[in-house]
Amino acid sequence: MDVDEEITVSTSAAAVSVPPAGNETVVSAIDAISLQPVQPVISPIITTPVIPPIAPIPALPVPRPLAPLPVRPPVVRPPPAQNGDSRTSDSDSDQEESGPSRAAGGSTQEYEISEESRLVRERQEKAVQELLMKRRAAALAVPTNDNAVRARLRRLGEPITLFGEREMERRDRLRMLMAKLDSEGQLERLMKAHEDEEAAATVAPSEPEEDIQYPFYTEGSQALLEARREIAKYSIVKSALRLHRARRKRDDPDEDLDAEVDWSLKQAANLVLECSEIGDDRPLSGCSISHDGKMLATCSLSGVAKVWSMPEVKKISALKGHTERATDIAFSPINYQLATASADRTARLWNKEGSVLRTFEGHLDRLARISFHPSGKYLGTASFDKTWRLWDVETGEELLLQEGHSRSVYGLCFHHDGSLAASCGLDSLARVWDLRSGRSILALEGHVKPALGVSFSPNGYHLASGGEDNTCRIWDMRKRKCLYIIPAHSNLISQVKFEPQEGYFLVTASYDMTAKIWSSRDFKPVKTLSGHESKVTSLDVVGDGQCIATVSHDRTIKLWSSRESEKEKAMDVD
């Protein structure tokens, strides 16, 4: 052990003396040491310098690169950045754990919001605001009387009505306006409107009552009173016959209603094109078949109406007299007289030879459709002056000027009993009027575009209407609502008519160049009458339902008949 210690001491001494001296000093030192008994210690001099670098290896600052290892900054989570509240809590925890310097750097990264996130947040805030506005509006007390709604809108400085706005839409507009004022803190303006209303209500009783009370009535003439009495007498008899016939069909065991309907629909399904004839040089606008089915009348945009024989479609006479285009034509239900409507604001009564019997003047705008009362004594005309009028056929006197539509009146027809009239117009409404009292008994809302045609069913309680929304609606007047919606055509429906005898099927004409037959039992399609090359403007059905006439803008008259198909079947049997 002593020898080893001496060796280490000597070697360390030699190691210390090696750097400052040259070769000579090293040899002298070795010679001095070699005087001692241990001589072979010269070789460790080469290995000893290796020992000092080995010793500090464990002490090297190996953990020093691990110093920046707090991997906290990358831990900043981007998903919480899209939610508003969770981000602040994460930044607080980072500040507590990693110190203020790193928290400042992390906060700049946290509050960077992408454009998409900003849009999402704005959309959410807008939806919340709208929801709060609706809740606030629902809690407000809004007047239900339309006159009160108009008065409050006036006091708030808003227009009392907008174009095409209805009562409920006006009330909703007032509700949202009041909610908006409430949310903006403009309560003074709102309270002032309330005070004005209360003041007006307190002053009103002291003033004489000159306000119009709704529903209001205008005084009619003595001729109108007599006409209403005649219509009431006529309708009572007709409705009694209709009800008696309906009861007999229901109670008689020999009557098979389903078989009768099936036979009628089979006849309608067998309709084929029997005749096609050029009707005029200009597009045709209306057609009508006489009560016995022996004559057909047409009118065109040239203003000329023509009478044709049936079923050969040979011209009998031409009715010339209108100065503008003719819009519709109708045969009288009791004789061969016929009436035409025109854009020259007049309607005319003709005989079948083409002589003018009477001219009905009074409308302020062009006429649309025309229709005879079932009694044949009265004529109804619809006009673009927003009214329809009832005329006395014998005297030519205007009996009734009926308002009620907010826009132009286009379609008009009479109930088969003669008690009711139905009108439709560009305000998308169909209205039913009681001719005996003058009341509007039904307002049928459902069409989303102008209604152009109406027709009563012979059963007495169904009404069909068609319009520019391409649909035909079936209304049940007993239930006062829409019974069925037929998506009938791919273009507007120009005319609607029930089969006049029993109403077992319904025919619609459309601008999609077709006419279609529908079952009135389940309103399923029965037959499509295709053949016209342009818009089909009008149609009519013979009393027994065996023949249908259509006219079109292609200037042709087409007759669709099942008699020809029956003849062909008989020939095949022979």
Image: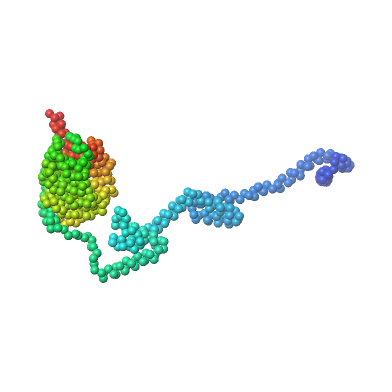
Q: Is residue 215 above or below residue 370?
A: below
Which of the image's four quarters has the C terminus? top left
Q: Is residue 186 visible?
A: yes
Q: Residue furthest bottom?
A: 206
Q: Is residue 459 visible?
A: no
State the residue at coordinates (16%, 42%): 320
Front residue of 507 and 259: 507
Kindly indicate the quadrant of the structure image that contains residue 130.
bottom left
Kindly indicate the quadrant of the structure image that contains residue 144.
bottom left
State the residue at coordinates (41%, 63%): 185
Q: Is 70 situated left or right of 279 in this image?
A: right
Q: Could you tell me residue 450's position as x and y percent? A: 26, 48
Q: Is 534 situated left or right of 182 in this image?
A: left
Q: Is residue 171 above or below residue 521?
A: below
State the count of labels: 0
State the residue at coordinates (13%, 58%): 222
Front residue of 294 and 555: 555
Front residue of 404 and 491: 404
Q: Could you tell me residue 413's position as x and y percent? A: 18, 48
State the residue at coordinates (29%, 49%): 448
Q: Could you tell me residue 468's position as x and y percent? A: 27, 45
Which of the image's four quarters has the N terminus? top right
Front residue of 184 and 37: 184
- Looking at the image, what colour scheme do you see? rainbow
Kindly indicate the quadrant of the structure image that contains residue 263.
top left
Q: Could you tell me residue 248's position as x and y percent? A: 11, 47
